[in-house]
Amino acid sequence: MPHIALVAPLFLENTNRYVAAFAALDGVTLSVVSQDPERAIPPALRPRIAGHFQVRDVGDGGELARAIRGLTHGVGRIDRLTGVLEQLQLPMAEARELTGVPGMRSAAAHRFRDKDVMKDALRAHGLPVAASQLVGSMRELEAFIDTVGYPIIVKPQAGLGSRGTHRIESASDLGALVRLGLDPRPGHSLQAEEFIRAREFTCETVSIHGRPVWRSGTRYFPTPLEVLETPWMQYCVLLPREVEAPWTDFADVNGAALDVLFGDEKEVAGTALTHMEWFLAESGKLYVSEVGARPPGVHIMPLMGLAHDVDMVHAWAELIAFDRFTPVKRKHAAGAAFFRGQGAGSRVVEVRGLEAAVEKIGPALVELRAPHVGQARASGYEGEGSALVKAETTDAVKAALLTLVETVQVRYG
Ligand SMILES: Nc1ncnc2c1ncn2[C@@H]1O[C@H](COP(=O)(O)OP(=O)(O)O)[C@@H](O)[C@H]1O
Ligand SMILES: [Mg+2]
């Protein structure tokens, strides 16, 4: 019986779904590592949890290793250490290395997490990525611009949620970067990249021992960068009904890129659900943008569930525990709209159009998390609330998403 240690930082709604999915698997011994105390485990899940270990910081590989040793002593040898958050992937790899738990090691985790290492590895294997360089000074940044030209993108080496990502179009933008104190310096390197004018997509892949067995994909409307650059824009994710181009065109690049990133660790680490962001450039060329060796965010898990009539969280847990996945067919289109406020201010002061939107969309609406007055302003492109929709055609989902973002208005004050 495999013994799974799941890192669940805090017992919040989304995390609890993953705990519940492992808890629901027959033939699994489940232990949980968290920052929350044992009493915070939802009562319904408690009987299925064989061991719990509290740590101060789930982001600390040494602490996770201590948890593994404690759980090994108390419950038994651990076969898998897993967790869904991007920020956990490196510390978990370190902890596996320190304790001998099978699975992804630091070198591979870095290839996924570090945008510079990832792009270098892919480029070395002839895979299409934007020209990029880790720059540690303004001189290096200027030299990079001399080679690739404007516009460029700068971002943190291990970013998340587009935070700290900026488009630099001119020398004056470059000056602004310096004035904001965001210029690269020794000890504060930045990832600089050629700007790809493109539509942005995702490819979710289930691999077993490094071999892709199933794919799904979405399109971002508009790109996360455009959303953050434009104060009034609201963001949507579309999962089309058809399994077709350009998603199918990307499959080979996706497979080849994962092969490079997993490296020689495919036996255990190569059993994964990965989330790859990619570009279809105006030139028609496909580029790998970035990859996570973890389930996707921005509601892509529930969207995949809706489109394929499957519980993706359960399927993922089964994949990790037993190297098992039953490929599922696409049956519907699905989409997510994210509500994001307009105006200045740090709180939501008005939410308009919710009822009208609900009425217009009708049965396509699956789930609504309404933003509410008084809510603190969110920093990212995911905004203060969201809606999930599902329909028989891609066009119907597109129409529903458009209705949502056009009708619902959130105002800050
Ligand atoms: N080279 C690039 N060309 C064009 N747009 C880019 C490029 N790199 C990033 N972006 C835009 O910035 C967003 C955030 O960048 P990404 O590398 O995905 O970082 P994060 O880890 O913060 O998601 C992307 O979703 C995309 O919209
Ligand atoms: Mg990204």
Image: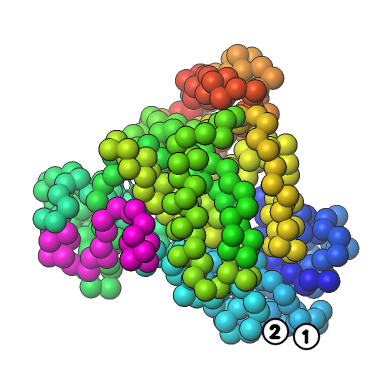
Residue shown at the point (70%, 84%) measured from the top left: 69
Q: How far, Cα to Cα, is label 1 from label 2? A: 6 Å
Q: What residue span does the magenta drawing correspond to?
A: 119-144
Instruction: Pick the residue in front: 234 or 121.
Output: 121
Q: Is residue 393 visible?
A: yes
At label 1, the amino acid type is: His
Point out which mark residue 73 bears: 1
Q: Decide: is 14 above or below 348.
A: below
Residue shown at the point (62%, 45%) measured from the top left: 301
Q: Residues within 10 Å of mark 1 (few under 14, many from 20)?
A: few
Q: Give percent across and percent down for residue 54.
A: 69, 73
Report if the CB atoms under discs 1 and 2 are less than 8 Å apart: yes
Is residue 110 rendered to the left or right of residue 135? right
Q: Give percent across and percent down for residue 288.
A: 39, 51
At label 2, the amino acid type is: Arg
Pointer 2 residue = 69
Is 120 inside the magenta-drawn segment? yes
Q: Give percent across and percent down for residue 208.
A: 64, 61
Residue shown at the point (45%, 41%) measured from the top left: 249
The picture quadrant where one finds residue 324 is bottom right
Point out which mark residue 338 bears: none
Q: Decide: is 346 above or below 127.
A: above
Is residue 195 rendered to the left or right of residue 343? left
